Amino acid sequence: MEAFRQEIIVGAVVAYMAFCVLTGLWAMKRTQSSSDFFIAGRGLGPIVVALALFSSTLSGFGFVGGPGLVYSIGVSSFWMVVISSTGYAIGFFLVAKRIRMIAELRDCLSLPDVVAARYNSEAVRFLIAITIVLGVMGYLATQILAMAVVMQAILSGTTMFSDIGLVTCVFISSTVLIFYCVTGGIIASVYTDVVQGAIMMIAGTLILFTATSVFDGGMQEATSIILADDGETMMPFGAAGIMASLGWFFVFGLGLAGQPHLITKMMMNRSMTDNRKILPMSLLGYVMAALLWISIGVVMRAAVIDGVIPPLDQPDDAASVFLSVFANPLLAGIVFAGLFAAIMSTSDAFLNIGTAAIIHDIPKAVRGHSLNNELFWARVVTVILALVAASFALYSHFQDATLVALLGAFGWGTFAASIFPVVAVGLNWQGATVAGAVTAISAALIINFVVQLAGIALPHGISGPLVAFVTSMILFIGVSLLTRKPDLPADIDQVLNL
Amino acid sequence: MLRPVINWIFVISLTMGLLMIAIMAADTVPNSGGLAHPEHAGMQVGDDGAERLDSIGVFAFLFQSLLLSLVVCLSILGVSERRRSPQLLALMGASLIFMLFVWWQMYSGHQAYLATGETGYFMGFPTATAWQVYGTWLGAIPLILIYSIGFRKYIYTKEDEAAFNKLLMETRAKNAAAKESR
C-alpha cells in the first residue's frame, strides 16, 4: 500500500471533488428561487444545519494553520479551539432564535436583511453588507490560495503531474468550487458541508489515534519533551503569552456569534425547536475535527525537538509532513480530502453571503430595492466573485501580498468586532440604536484597518482585533444608552420580547 | 440602576477596556509575546514565565475573570426577560462559579509550576494545561445544557411558539391584503 501512497491520496481528493460536482447537479433541480439559492428555503433539518455550521467554522486554517501554530507557539493556539463550547453557547443564546424569527417574519435572505429589519435602517444594512464584501474577498482569496497550494503539493508528487503549476491548480480547484456553488447555491453548499463535516470528524479522530502512537509514552511523552525544552510553551498560555491567549478566547469565543457565514446558517433550519439539538451536535462535530489541530501540532513539535524528524521548512508544513511520515496512506487520503472539505465548506459559505451582499443588500440599501431576476444575477455574481478572489490570490502569491493581507485583516477578528455587538447584542436589547450600531461598526473597521496598515505591534501580545472588539462593545452600548430609545416596528418589538 | 443585564454588560466591558489600557501601559519584557527558538527556526519559546507575568499577571487574571462574567451575562441577555427566573439565574450563577473555578485552577497551577518547576500530568498534559484543555472546554457545557435541556422552559416556550405563530399569521394576512389592494 505504501508504494501507492500518492495515488491513494490523489484518488481520495478526486473522488471528493467528483462528489461536489454531482451534488451541484442534484441541487440545481431544487434551486428554483433566490430564497432557495441563499437560505435553502428555510427547510433544512437539524443534522444538516449542525454539520454545515461546524464545518464552515473550521476552515483550511484549522487543518493547515492550526497544527502549524501549535508547532510554532505551543499551547497559546489551543485557546482558539477550547473556546468552541463557549462560542457556540453564546451564538445560540444570543442569535439562533431571533435571527430565525425575523428571517421568517420579514422573508429575509441575508444577514444585512435581518439587521435592516431590526434597526429599521438602510445605513446599518449598507455598512454590514460592505463589511461582509470586504471580509469575503480576503477570506476567499486566502482559501483559494491554500486549496491550490495543497493541490500542487499532492499532484506534483505524481509522475504525470510533477510539473503542474500553481495557476493550473487555482483553475482546477476554483472550477469545482464555482460549479457546485453556481448550480446548486446554498443547497449544494450545505449538503456538501454534511459530507465535508463527516470527513473532517473521521479525519480528526483517526489522526488523534495516530498521533498518540508516535511516541511510546503517547501524548504525555510528547508534551514532556516540549516542557523540558521550554516550560512556558507547554503551559496554559504558551509561547505567545497570557494576553495573546486571552485575546483569542475573547475574539474567537464571543466572536463566533459575529461571523456572518455561520450565523446566516442559523436562518436556514426548518423548525426553531431544532436549535436545542443543533447546538450540541455542532459542538461535538467541531471538537472531533479539531482534535487534528492539537494532536498534530504537539507531536510534530516534540518530534523535531527530540530529533525524530528534521526541522520543518515552515510551521504550516506540520500537517503535510505528519501525514507523509506518520500516517497510513489511506488515512492520509482521508485527511487530504478532509482538508479540501474544510477549505471548500468555508469558501462556499463566503461565496454565498458575499453574493447576497452584492446583488441583494447593497442595491436595496442604495436604490431601495434589489435586482430583478435575483437568481440569475446570483449565479453570475458567484462566478465573478470567485474569479476576482482567485485573481487576488494569484496576485498576492506572485506579486504583492499587501492587498490580500489588508483584506485578510477583515477576517474573523473584524467580523467579530463589527458584527457581534450589532447583531448578537442588538437582537436581544430593544435599547440598541442606529447611532450605536453605526459607531460600533465604523470604530471596529477603523481600528482593524489602522492596526493592519500601520503594522502596529501592541505590547504584551495584545491584538488589534481584541482592542477593536472591546472598543466596539463599549461604543455600541454607550452610544445607544446616550441616544433616544428607538421606536421599533410592532412586529420586531414583539419578536424582541419573545 | 444596574438591574438590567445590559448595564452589567456595559460596566464589565468598560472595566475590561480599562484593564487593557493598564496592561498596555505596564512594563514590558523582551519575551512578553514570545522569542525565537534558539535552535529551531519557525518555533517560538516563552522563556521566563514569571518575569513576563510580573507586571501584568493580576490584571490579566482579572481580565479573564471579567470575560467569563461577560459570557454569563450575555447568555442571560439571550433569555427573554420574562423567563429570567430565580432558578435560571441560580443555574447561570453556578455556571459562572464553575468557569471561575476552572480558570483559578489553571492560573494557580501555572503559578505553582513557575515557583517549583515541577508539574503532575493529567490525560497527556501538564496539570495546569489539562485544566486549560479539558476544563475550558467543559466550562461552558453547563450553558449548553441549560440551553438544550431548558429550551422549552427558558428559550422558546410553548407560549412563545404560539405567540410567534400568531404574529406570523397576522403579518402574512396583512401582506396578502396589501398585495391585493395594489
Image: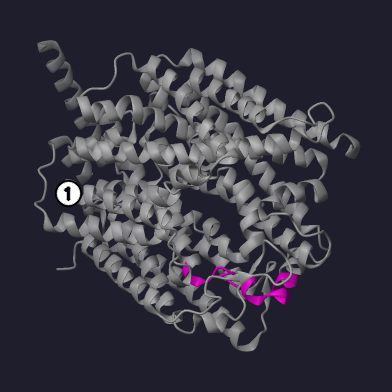
| On screen, residue A87 above or below A126 | below
Q: Position of residue B75 (x, y in %)?
A: 34, 56
Q: Position of residue A236 (x, y in %)?
A: 57, 71
Res A289 visible: no
* Residue B90 belongs to the span the image colors magenta: no
Residue A120 lies in quadrant: top left
Q: Chain of mark 1?
A: A
* Residue A228 belongs to the span the image colors magenta: yes
- Whether residue A137 sits left or right of residue A119 in the image: it is right
Span colored in magenta: A224-243
At 44% from the left and 53% from the top, the residue drawn is: A87
The residue identified by callout 1 is A435
- Helix, strand or loop at label 1? It is helix
Q: In what quadrant of the picture does the N terminus of chain A appear?
A: top right
Q: Main secondary structure of the magenta part?
A: helix
Coloured how?
Answer: one colour
